[in-house]
Image (spheres, coloured by chain):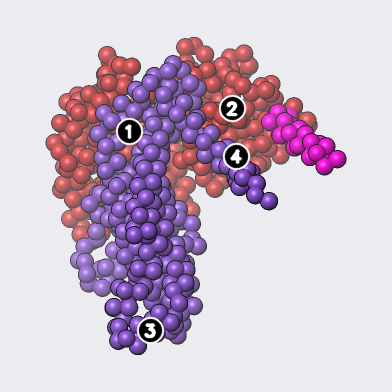
Amino acid sequence: MHNRALPYLLTLPSLILAAVVIFWPVVDLIQISTHEVSRFGQLRDFSGLDNFAALVADPDFIKALVRTGVWTAAVVGGALLVSIPVAVILNTDFYGRSLARVIVMLPWAVSLTMTAIVWRWALNGESGMLNSALRGLGLADHNIQWLASAATAFPMQIMIGILVTVPFTTTIFLGGLSSIPDDLYEAAALEGAGPVQQFRRITFPLLKPFVNIAIVLNTIYVFNSFPIIWVMTQGGPANSTDILVTHLYKLAFRIGKLGEASAVSLVMLAILLVFTAIYIRLAMRGERA
Amino acid sequence: MAISKLKTGLLAGLSVLALAAQANAGEVRVTVAEYSAKTGPYFQEVEKAFEAANPGVDVKFEVVPWDVLLQKLTTDITAGTNADLSIIGTRWLIDFVQQGVAEPLDGYINDEFKGRFIDTFMSPSVMDGKTYGLPIAASARAMYYNKELLEKAGVANPPATWAELKDAAAKIKALGGENYGFGLQGKEIETDVYYYYAMWSQGSEILDKDGTSGLDSPGAIEAAKLYKSLIDEGLTQPGVTSYAREDVQNLFKQGKVGMMITAPFLSNQIKEEAPNLKYGVAAIPAGPTGARGTYGVTDSIVMFSNSKNKDEAWKLLDFLFQTDWRAKFTQGEGFLPVNKEEAKMDYYVNNADLAAFTALLPDARFAPIIPGWEEVAQITSDAIQKVYLGEGDPEALLKEAAAKADGILKK
């Protein structure tokens, strides 16, 4: 029963599916990005790397690239920092825990676009909820124009990004926490370890693989996340809140440069691939040691 | 046995796919933009009436939000799954014509049909002497003013020039409270157009006579400085770059804004949402020389070259452009009439708001018919947003934008 081909045979269906769903579009993208393309996607002459060169020469692209890095790091990092304590608290037994869990998970149940639309209203300068709340509490004496410039709009977008990323991240951590056996804590408590020590010596090390998963998955989601920024500012004013996805959307569907847009999406794919490969490598090495 | 069953199953599946891919004879698919909540029901009604009058023809309307229309058309055309007819922004038409996507309609149009249209609105859809689209929606812009606010501020007549507008805005500001003189749009669709109103009144045009960008002309720079001074002196609502057109309209409906420039459909919205607001519609303010300009917009309905049912599609177009159906659509959406007979109806003749719009039509500019226009508009919007934000000297920003635009126009 030692058939060496069996594992390959068994994974073949999913490989074929992945090929159709992933590789085919990528091949298509490579084709579009290396040709001159009409407004409606008909391929013209082969143009080599012209589309990529045009990107590098475009200051808006470079700025969007850097901003995407800030956006991803801030949202993923922020979600991580918020989610660990939230998960630890939700894992302890207290009155009303199920209700608290539901509340933390709720943002996940609302579509991202809807969340963004509600925030766009809430951040409206004249009739927005946030301004009236701040003024009601006496924290501000005049209306703040949240979305009028990147200085206030982008941090707000990051905050909303964190808010909607927390539920998923917390879920991963809750799963991780429930896999830690209680006797470890009991033993540590017997030896006189306080809660901080227990967290540092038991919880965090055993949670590490889950933190790694959360970082990789969230980075992929957040890096590619479109609705929050698009709905609230469309990357504006004057492209000052653009990240790569919104830049790509404008290139493709506003201006009709499908070649350059395909190039952007290949660059994005490459960045994510390299990031994931390096990160998984580092994380695995850490685990073996 | 099992394999043969699998085979028949696969074959059956394939044939279903083949059937689905092939358009049914007599089927006409139409992509239409959703202008308001009334658009969908209107086209449902058209579908019923047309199918009753033309048995054997199956009409399918796909109602698409305006924001994603161009995206949907781009992907549909790329994949070859586009409908037979579609509403498009007339400013996109040149791309459709150059790519050979749009079918010329001259073979179908006879003199009677042509005679139904007002020429001003028909002309943007004509290229190289061929008619590629029919104007299905037309609009222009004029200035709305809040009568009560102006009265309280002691301004007797709606301002006719930008100097008067600035003066009136200052008086409204002096009233105190959350009252803003001039509602200035600084975000999303038509941000560039809102700037053109001032630019045209200074005697500048989007494109100079030699086909280069007019953004670096003295009038264009003057216009940017004018808007910037309105912002700096607190004569607009604060944070203009966070206000899309709808946001400024909402401020106007709440009675917080003295004057704003927008399309006829605001009248319909006010009627439904703020029936007690006392407002008037006047011409867009003129510049020092008396020059003024409004923005004329048409959307066209086009037939795709790859349509398999062109005759049926044309029948539907002929049906759509009957006076009664046109009137129902135009009045529901708050557009301007494109049919001559329709324009003579009482509804339009006795409507003071609409009269202000039609009076401005001789001064109407349409978006220039050039390839790459969307990109030039985007550059303009970006530059003017930077001016509003104070991220540089208006003159330098506009000259930089003009140079960028010229790079595209030369291609």
Between circles 3 and 1, the one closer to the viewer is 3
Chain for disc number 1: B
Q: Residue at x 15, y 38 (%)?
A: B392
Of the residues shown, which amino acid type is indicated by label 1?
Answer: Gln
Nearest to the eye among marks 4 and 3: give it. Answer: 3
Label 1 SS: helix
Q: CA distance from mark 4 to mark 1?
A: 42 Å
Position of B150 with respect to B51 (left or right) is: left
- Quadrant housing the C terminus of chain B: top left
Where is residue A158, by image quadrant? bottom left
Label 4 to label 3: alpha-carbon separation: 50 Å
Decide which of B322, B370 is in the foreground and name it: B370
Residues at marks 2 and 3 on the same chain: no
Magenta part, dominant SS:
helix
Residue A181 is left or right of residue A123, and the answer is right
Chain B colour as displayed: red
* Residue, disc 3: A187
Query: Percent position (x, y) of residue B395?
Result: 15, 31
Q: Is residue A159 above or below residue B120?
A: below
Locate residue B201 relative to residue B358 in the image: left or right: left
- Which residue type carries mark 3? Ala
**Mark 2 vs 3: CB contact within 8 A:** no
Q: Callout 2: 10 Å neighbours few (<14), some, many (20+)?
A: few
Q: Residue furthest front?
A: A2
- What are the residue bounds of the magenta stretch? B1-24
Check if mark 4 and mark 3 are on a common chain: yes
In the rendered image, the vertical position of residue B279 relative to residue A172, given as above or below: above
The N terminus of chain B is located in which quarter?
Answer: top right
Q: Which residue is mark 1?
A: B378
Please state which of the two labelled residues, at mark 4 or mark 1, is closer to the viewer: 4
Determine which residue is flagged by label 2: B80
* CA gap, disc 2 and disc 1: 28 Å
